[in-house]
Image (cartoon, helix red, strand yellow):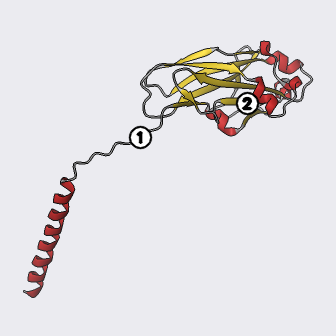
Amino acid sequence: MKNTHTYAISFSLIIIIIIALLSFSCNNDMIVDANFPEPLIYLPLASTGILDISEPDTSETPQFFLNPEGSKLIIPVGVYRSGLTNLSNATIDILANTDTLLSMGFDLSLILPQDKSIFPESIEMANGSELAIFEVEIDRQYLIDTDLEEVVFALTVNSAQVESNEELNTLVIRIKPDVFEN
């Protein structure tokens, strides 16, 4: 009998505590505003430092491939937009960036000639989208014919509508041409 009485008191106390906690939590009408960072565009491949193309890529998700004719090295590049407010269209400008390569200490003779690559001048990132993809095409025959041990190339993305993450808006690509001799 004593156990039943103790159990009833304990159960009643637990119920009172739960009701008290719920009543206090329901009276808090304060809504906290949160400051979220503005969206930024960036190149995820830039986080690796330098994208090295020094051996064939046979993975399931290759970082580069040859077009069906074998005349172009194709590198798919994704531009991402971070943040929660991706509610506008954005034009992403894509520029070759020789200055970055020179500031990194690469010799001017290693820089891929401008006429040996093709990429769009700009791409559109749609309203609400977090990703836009483009391709860089590099003349494979130039890579086969060159006597250089490596060729370097850099791209920078910017936009008038969305700020760029300055640490990740430039992609440096280093290619070992002997990979493409066959």
Task: Give the residue type that dot 1 points to.
Answer: Asn
Q: Quadrant of residue 56?
A: top right
Cα–Cα span, label 2 and label 1: 33 Å
Residue 179 image point, x, y percent: 82, 28
Q: Residue at x 41, y 40 (%)?
A: 35
Please state which amino acid type lies under the numbered disc 2: Val
Furthest-bottom residue in this view: 2
Where in the figure is residue 91, as x and y percent of width and height? 54, 17
Label 1 residue SS: loop
Q: Which residue is mark 1?
A: 35
Relative placement, left or right, of 95 versus 153 is left
State the residue position of label 2.
172
Q: Residues within 10 Å of mark 2 (few under 14, many from 20)?
A: many
Res. 76 mark = none
Secondary element at image label 2? strand
Q: Residues within 10 Å of mark 1 (few under 14, many from 20)?
A: few
The structure residue drawn at horizontal position 69% and vertical position 30%, both measured from the top left corner, is 171
- Asked if one can make out residue 60 in the rendered structure from this viewpoint, the answer is no
Q: Which residue corresponds to the image point at 59% horizontal and 27% vertical from the top-left?
A: 78
